[in-house]
Structures are given as structure tokens and as C-alpha cells.
Amino acid sequence: MKLDSKYTGVIFHILGWAIYFSFQMVFSGYFDKSISMTEDVGWWIIQVGIIVFFYLNYLLLIPRLLFRKRYILYALAVIAIGAAIVIGIEFFIGSTRPGPEHGLPPPEMMNHDMPHHDGPHGRPDGKGILNGITVFFIVLLVSSAIRITGELLRVQRQKQRLENEKLSAELIALKAQINPHFVFNVLNNICSLARKKSEDTETFIIKLSQLIRYNLYDDKGCKMSLDREVSFLTNYIDLQKMRLGDAVFVDYRFTGDFGLYEIEPMMLFPFIENAFKHGVSYSMPSLISISINLEKSCLHMRVTNSIVDSKTPQSEENPSGIGLTNVKKLLALLYAHKHSLSISTDNNVFSVDLKIELA
């Protein structure tokens, strides 16, 4: 069972203090004394002071002052609170500590924390305070290091979460980005076929309905059968060919046993849509070539298209969709270390070469 993060933090603190007190008991020599540690009120007062200072800095001073860049006020607050606790402990122990005749050990047994050195008239001579300041300075460093490190990790996790949410939102946009203009154009073509009473009318209506059904209903965010994904792409290309007619030569070949593997829905679509968006010209010869080959668990897709306007080179950004640049991010998120992508332009031909390991 996975613990909630807040409980994990509490457990971490409890374990940390348990380890701290264990070392204190061992190295202070309490186990070698005849006196019980619970009888040494002074020792416990010191520990309480350390804990209070630790959490005042950890829970109050750092988030309220240091993280808000109020550095001078933070430093003054640390000095004031630390000094108040150290002086209070020193004078309390110095004024209330019984002498050796009561059977309690001298304060030097606590030299692991804040040793006492009595001056004239039994008053503290200042060395105990100096040692106390040293101890509290160490506590300040430890509590600050833990809190700042935790904050850095939290910010990093939040940044990663936001990045993942952003990419997930882009993936959702990708899955719903069938261009409505494309659908309207296809419908117009189907109307033309219907007027001519073409036998292809029913076929293209079915293809369009399957295209929309897959885009709206079948894709629920889970991985999809590669066979269904390829069928979606086939319907899209066939409808584009019908819309473009003889103006563009479109060649596509899909080979492999696609029913054996699954893929993230609409992962291949942007590259094909990009080719039709930028590789179509009605005034000059243009070519779009698409090949998808599945060999074992490796999917290899290659898409090439003519660059119809050399003055405005084909961009990796797609104004109507999420763009190939963002598709790269999606691939990095969904297929980290399991894909390779090459995009190039050569001799007025734009090429995309993508390999994804599906196993």
C-alpha cells in the first residue's frame, strides 16, 4: 500500500529524531550511569529546545520569510529566537540544577549538547552559551537543508507534473484534431458523387463515418490496437485521395501483422496530416508517399511529400494542430528511449522517418 506523501514526511521526521536520540543516549554515556535518563530534567530541556528551534525554523521562518526573500528579517528572527532559547535553557538549568549531593550527574555529561561551565557565584560563565549557540547553528543548518531540499524536490515534481499535464492536454488535442475543413470538403465531394449517382458514394460515407467514430468514441485515452489505428489512417488517406482527385499522386503501403501490437491512439496521424497540409499543389506536380512497416515489434513509418513552395519551407509547426515539435514531446513522454525520429528536407522533399519499439 502506497503511503500518502504527508504521512511519509511524518514517518521520516519520527525516524530522524529516533536516530538522533539513539546517538545521544549512546555517546552521552547514559547507559554507563546509574542514573536514569528520564531523571535528568536538564538534558530533556535541552532536547526540547532543539526540537522547538528546529520546527520554528522548518515550519515558520523558512516558508514565511526565507522563501519570500525577506532575508534580513529571516536572519534577525533566527538570531532572536535562537538566542532566546539558548539563554533561557542556560539560565534555567543553571538556576535549578541540583548539586552532586542530589545524585544527579554534573552538567559536563551533556557536553554532547551544551556543556555548562560555572563561573563565580554559580553563574554561567558564557562558555555554555557559546557551545549552545554552536549546537543551535548546526540545528539551523540541518533544518534549513531539509526544508530547502524538500521544497526543491516539490517544485521539481510540480514542474514535471505540469509538464506531463500539458503534454497530456496536447495529446487530447491531437486526438481531436481532425480538421473540420477536411470533413466539410469530403462531404462536398460525397455530395458530388451522390449527384452523379456514383457507386462509390456509399463507400466513402462509410469511410467518413468510421473516421469520425474512431476519433470521437473509440479513442478513450488507452492504447489502441495497431490494426485499428492503421485502418483509421487508411480511411483518412482514401478520403484525402478522393478530395484531391488527380491533382496529387498519393502512394501508401502498410505491411505487417498489425493485430499483434497496440499503440497510443493518433500517434502517427500528425505526420500524415502534415504531409497533406503542406505537400499539395494544384498548379504543379506533387507527391505524397507513406509507408508503414511492422517487423517483429518495431514499427517503421516513413512519410515524404513534395515541398510545393520553396520560398516558404515546410515548418515543423502546424497552426491547425499541435505541430510536429509537440509531437516530439509526446513521443518522448509516451515512448521514452523506445523511439527514434528523423525529420529532414532534401531536394524539395520533406521527409519524416519514425521508428517505435512497441514491445
Image: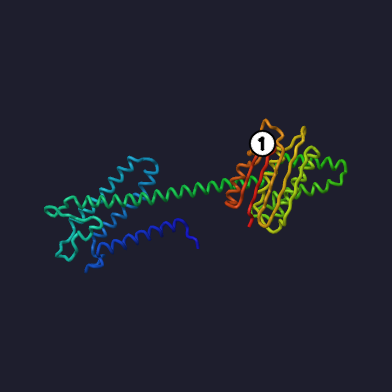
Residue 5, image x, y percentages? 46, 56
Question: What amino acid is at disc 1?
Answer: Gln
Residue 192 lies in what quarter of the image?
top right
Colour basis:
rainbow
**What residue is drawn where x is 45% and y is 50%?**
153
Residue 325, image x, y percentages? 61, 42
The extreme left residue here reads: 121
SS at mark 1 in the image: loop
Viewer-nearest residue: 260 or 26: 260
The extreme right residue here reads: 197
Check disc 1 and report the residue beneath it: 314
Q: As drawn, is 315 to the left or to the right of 6?
A: right
Q: As drawn, is 34 to the left or to the right of 145?
A: left
Which quarter of the rendered picture does the C terminus lie within? Answer: bottom right
Residue 298, image x, y percentages? 66, 54
Viewer-nearest residue: 104 or 337: 337
Residue 98, image x, y percentages? 17, 61
The extreme bottom residue here reads: 34
**What residue is drawn where x is 17% and y is 66%?**
103
**What residue is drawn where x is 28% and y is 64%?**
26
Q: As drawn, is 13 to the left or to the right of 195?
A: left
**Within-10-Å neighbours for mark 1: few <14, some 14–19, many 20+:** many
Q: As drawn, is 56 to the left or to the right of 268?
A: left
Residue 271 lies in what quarter of the image?
top right
